[in-house]
Amino acid sequence: MRLLLRSLAAVLSLMTSAAHAQEIPVDVLGTDAFLPGSGRVWLSGCTYEAERYVACNNAARPVLDAIAKSGDATPGAALQAFMRQTFTEKGCTFDAPAETFRVNGIFLSFDANAASEIRCAGQKSGLVFAPGVITFLDTLYFLSGDPPQ
């Protein structure tokens, strides 16, 4: 019985991984993939929570600068504005509600359900899971570990 339960758990785990996993080219995770004008932004130290949120404790310098220089806006509003600009510069439609991107203390968070209104070149919005990284519309790269090297 124990062997049957272990086998069933392994099969379910593989099925879930296969449903969410997609190959992310290794070169995408290097620093060259995130140069200005690339249309890609990395965040690191990220975790996926409650089947909906991605929370990160670090991000690329332009993201942190946008938050630090938020002026009269809240840090969360500054993060949302930075992400809106990132997507619209790529020609994407950004109809996501306020607070899709938030700053909660030291964490930068992303609400994947609210982000369903962001569309790029007809691609369906959604998170793509791969070992060590979650991506969103080939624009946001949520790294589980350290920043790209």
Image (cartoon, rainbow, N blue to C red):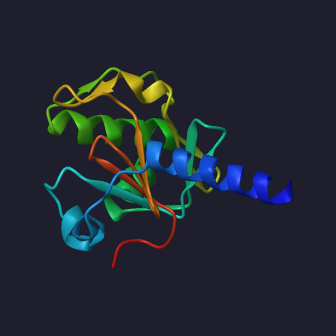
Counting every numbered tag in the picture gives: 0
Rendered image quadrant of residue 34: bottom left
Seen at 35% across and 51% down, the residue is 22
Question: Which residue corresponds to the image point at 29% horizontal and 40% vertical from the top-left?
Answer: 137
The image quadrant of residue 59 is bottom left
Name the one closer to the observer, 117 or 67.
117
The residue shown at (61%, 37%) is 51
For the C terminus, which image quadrant?
A: bottom left
Instruction: Name above or below for residue 26 compared with residue 96.
Output: below
Within the image, what quadrant is residue 62 found in? bottom left
Give the percent coordinates (x, y) of residue 118. Answer: 32, 27
Left or right: residue 23 versus residue 59 is left
Is residue 72 in sight in this rendering? yes
Q: Residue at x 54, y 64 (%)?
A: 45
Measured as percent of width and height from the top left, residue 77 is found at 46, 35
Q: Measured from the top left, where is residue 16 in percent x and y? A: 54, 45
107 horizontally vs 40: left or right: right
Task: From the viewer's perspective, tell me whether residue 130 is left or right of residue 107.
Answer: left
56 versus 99 height, above or below: below
Q: Nearer the viewer, residue 126 or 140?
A: 126
